[in-house]
Amino acid sequence: MDDTSDVGRVIDAFFLYTQRATPATEKGAQALDRLLRLAEHHDSGQVARVAGFIASVHDGATFRWDPFELRMLDVEISDDMLACLDALRWGRHDLHRLVPDGERRVLQVLRAWGLVPTAARPDAGGPR
């Protein structure tokens, strides 16, 4: 086995990864920003689905999301969701960190749509 060809394959794989990951991440960040703006400023049935998706992208272990939801949304919204999923697939960054004030905005959307568990709400009352 030739070590030079192994190194070449690793370099080629890294180059291919970078070529795909960078634009996917950029598109995903832009898409998440659009979805956040939608969830922050509208309250239609579609936006409830958007808020659920944002919750899942932020914390998939806590918030499950059904991909069949894509069928119930406008094409532009579902395209943005797919862009977010593609960015997550490449896994270079948490998407909310690539959006201006992303952490605060995501948590605000989750609270507004009742998606934060009661124990996690600072205004839930009870012992602190």
Image: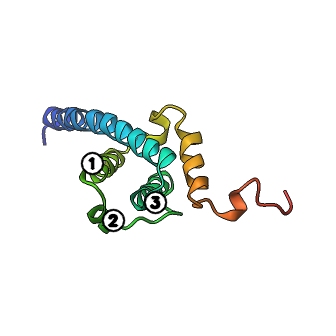
Residue 86 coordinates in the image, percent (x, y):
29, 48
Whether residue 25 is visible to the viewer of this picture, yes or no, is yes
Tell me whether circle 1 and circle 3 mark residues in contact (CB < 8 Å). no
Residue 32 sits in quarter: top left
- Number of on-image labels: 3
Q: Identify the residue under disc 1.
A: 76
Q: Secondary structure at mark 2?
A: helix
Callout 3: helix, strand or loop? helix
Mark closer to the chain start, 2 or 3: 3
**The N terminus - image quarter:** top left
Q: Earlier in the sequence, mark 2 or mark 1?
A: 2
Residue 5: x and y, percent? Answer: 13, 35
- Please rate how many residues cluster around mark 3, counting C-alpha atoms within 10 Å: few if below 14, some from 14 to 19, many from 20: some
Left or right: 90 in relation to 51: left
Residue located 29% across and 46% down the image: 83
Q: Amino acid at mark 2?
A: Glu
In the depicted view, which residue is nearer to us: 15 or 63? Answer: 63
Residue at left offset 16%, top offset 37%: 9
- Mark 2 or 1: in front is 1
As helix, strand or loop, the secondary structure at mark 1 comes to helix
Mark with earlier residue (1, 3): 3
Q: CA distance from mark 2 to mark 3?
A: 11 Å
* Residue kind at label 3, given as amino acid type: Ala
* Residue beneath disc 3: 48
Give the answer, above or below, for where 48 lies relative to 58: below
Q: Which mark is residue 69?
A: 2
Q: Looking at numbered disc 1 in the image, what kind of residue is underneath it?
A: Glu
